[in-house]
Amino acid sequence: MTESDLSPARFGVAFRGFMDAVLREAKPAGQLLGDRLRAHLNVDSTRLAVTAEEFDPFEHPNVQVALDEYLNGVGRRAELVGVSAPQKRYMDFGLSDLLEPGGMPGQIAWAEGQVDYINFHLAGDRVLSCVQFGVYLVTDGDIRLIVALTGPSEGPGPRPKVKVDTVSVRSDDGQALLAGIREAVQRLNVYRGHVISLSPGQLGMGPQTLVAFHTLPKVTRDDVVLPAAILERVERHTIVFAEHAAALLAAGRSLKRGLLLHGPPGTGKTLTLMYLIGQMPGRTVLLTTGFGMGLLQPVVQLARQLAPSMVVLEDVDLIAEERGNPYGGGPLLFELLNELDGLREDCDVIFALTTNRPELLEPALAARPGRVDLAVELPLPDAEGRRRLLELYTRGLDLHEVELDAIVAQIEGASPAYIKELVRKAALLAATEGEHLVLTAAHFETALAELAGGGHLARRLLGFQPSGAIASASLTNRAASTGLSVVE
């Protein structure tokens, strides 16, 4: 080759070939992984097809559980080996790359290494270790399979999803394995029957924190102080409906339904939802709040997959008040209603929404009639309700010469949250006076004075509205246009 023949393009090709040869000759510290994989198959791997299946990041523990079930099958043996390569966490690779004799172009050949795991924290303080980088060498009688499991990148990276690659001497064996994993992911789902949440603030912290499990306090019917007709209507739309879901479905009735609880702050919307959740054991519950609704699509996907389920969207007005902002969350309210409308009729999913400002939802509800089919206003308690709340919150306390009726008359317009704080302050005052906690009328008078001393803002924060004035707008006059069933 003369100097004139050495054009920049030809030089580049020659230099690339030289570097590839150098990398092929550079022996990694461990045994070449490709050699091990090809020896397991005992055939020419270049003639075999690699089949891959991808799953969302939150499915990683479900994929691991499903794969473990398959590997523990009768007569089946599997050896798990790790993958060693520089910067592998920042690379996107698959089983075909691992089988390549020379490794990926421009890279030292893959070597056996330690298996990488990542921990997922599940319900009941259970920790599940999932393979992040690993290859299973599977033998099942005369069947030879290789299964590679790679988890998603931790934070921004080239691998947005969990990936299962498989190669087998007979392609049908690999397809059967992937079909079995898909079925087991649904059947063995670690989220089923639990209370979970997805938060956008967790997405950048690694896949293991994508889904959080919650334990809600037990709430009995006696703890929910509402007018009997309102509570019965809510129960019928949720608890009773769930008990008769099979009969309703057989009669051709839709199982998906929407519930809107609205009213002044502190009137027990969240408490009511916790009571409903506790009365429907086994139903998967997905919690989210206004600014967490950017994950509506995966939330609804999980709700559909894990039905019967319940999606709780608190403070839903937070995604309605910014409709005019093209960079805000306004369209999310319409997306929410569209997602509800897109569910199959036989999908037993309850969408439970709460808001202190129902007037902000009216335009969207009017534009999408029938998506939310029951709206219930939780009012400030009347005199009977205030007395029931005082009896509830003073349960277990020693009262001395305390006239509850006198307190009831002084706190007209108080919300359940206000009454709970009143009792807490009175108990604190009593606790500072001696070893035995005994509440007197004087403690309640002082507590009332302290709450009043906080001014208008402090009373509003606890849901106190003099003379029982209700700040939230009623949906009664809008029921005809929105298709809502309204209870006040």
Image (cartoon, helix red, strand yellow):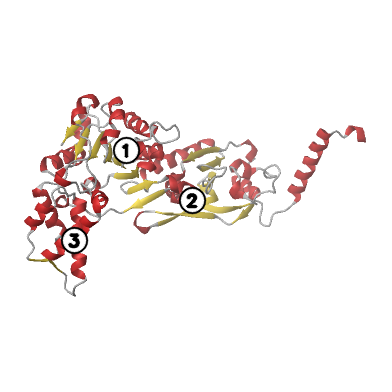
Q: Position of residue 253 (x, y in %)?
A: 22, 29
Label 3, secondary structure: give it: helix
The residue positioned 72% from the left and 53% from the top of the image is 27
Q: Is residue 108 above or below residue 479?
A: below
Label 2, secondary structure: give it: helix
- Disc number lying in front (2 or 3): 3
Q: Quadrant of the N terminus?
A: top right
Dot 3 alpha-carbon crowd within 10 angstroms: few under 14, some 14 to 19, many 20 or more: many
Q: CA distance from mark 2 to mark 1?
A: 28 Å
Q: CA distance from mark 1 to mark 3?
A: 33 Å
The residue positioned 34% from the left and 44% from the top of the image is 289
Q: CA distance from mark 2 to mark 3?
A: 44 Å
Cβ atoms at labels 1 and 3 below 8 Å apart: no
Q: Position of residue 372 (x, y in %)?
A: 26, 32
Amino acid type assigned to the residue bearing label 3 in the image? Ala
Dot 2 alpha-carbon crowd within 10 angstroms: few under 14, some 14 to 19, many 20 or more: few
Cβ atoms at labels 2 and 1 below 8 Å apart: no
- Name the quadrant containing residue 315: top left
Observer-nearest residue: 426 or 375?
426
Amino acid type assigned to the residue bearing label 1 in the image? Asp
Label 1, secondary structure: give it: helix
Instruction: Give the labeled residue for mark 2.
Output: 205
Observer-nearest residue: 396 or 404?
404
The residue positioned 38% from the left and 33% from the top of the image is 330
Q: Position of residue 211 (x, y in %)?
A: 40, 48
**Residue 447: mark in rendering:** 3
Amino acid type assigned to the residue bearing label 2 in the image? Met
Q: Position of residue 265 (x, y in %)?
A: 24, 45
Instruction: Give the labeled residue for mark 1.
Output: 317
Q: Is residue 206 above or below residue 299?
A: below
Q: Is residue 387 visible?
A: no
Observer-nearest residue: 230 or 183?
230
